Amino acid sequence: MKRTVFTSMAVLLLSAGSMIGHHGYAEYDRNAPVTLEGNLKNVLWANPHVVLTLETATKGDFSVEWAAVFQLSRSGINSVPVKAGDHLIVTGSINRNPERRILTLVQEIRRPADGWHWENQQKAGLVHAPNDAIKLRVAVKER
């Protein structure tokens, strides 16, 4: 009996931690994508999300929650493709509370300087880098 109670408590505590750690996307409007343009201040290449800090000219700094490292790796991105100072155009879903300044559910990231861009595979089925045609499960995109 004691073993059953102890095991039940351990499972409950361990699962509660993972439920608290993950967030939902109800705070974000998936049906109204927003495009932000600005200069990249910082890149945090870590789980649970790769986070970009984007400095916009008129709206201030935004935290852009890109994707998990393993998700980017599956799409062919195994190292940081952007760096501080890059001018980026990012499309995704913005937090409904404008004071939070968070963009997530990223659909696309563009770097106009060299034509590099990334598109969400679930949306488009591809990733594109200059001078490369990267074949993924669904499609190949040629320039």
Image: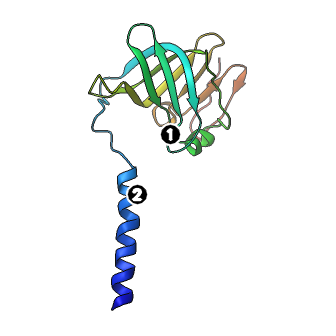
Where residue 19 sits: x, y (%)?
A: 36, 56
Residue behind mark 1: 49
> At numbered mark 1, what does the secondary structure look like: helix, strand or loop?
loop
Q: Is residue 92 left or right of residue 133?
A: left
Residue behind mark 2: 18
Q: Does 114 sit above or below residue 3?
A: above
Outermost right residue = 131
Q: How many marks?
A: 2
Where residue 27 sits: x, y (%)?
A: 28, 35
Choose between 76 and 45: the one closer to the eye.
Answer: 45
Which quadrant: the N terminus? bottom left
Which quadrant: the C terminus? top right
Q: Is residue 94 left or right of residue 119?
A: left
Mark 2: few, some, or many residues within 10 Å (few <14, many ≥20)?
Answer: few
Q: Identify the residue at image location x=43%, y=16%.
A: 36
Name the quadrant containing residue 47.
top right
> At numbered mark 2, what does the secondary structure look like: helix, strand or loop?
helix
Q: Does label 1 or label 2 sit earlier along the sequence?
A: 2
Type of the residue with mark 2: Ser
Q: Does 70 sit above or below residue 80?
A: below
Mark 1: few, some, or many residues within 10 Å (few <14, many ≥20)?
Answer: some
Q: Identify the residue at image location x=41%, y=14%.
A: 60
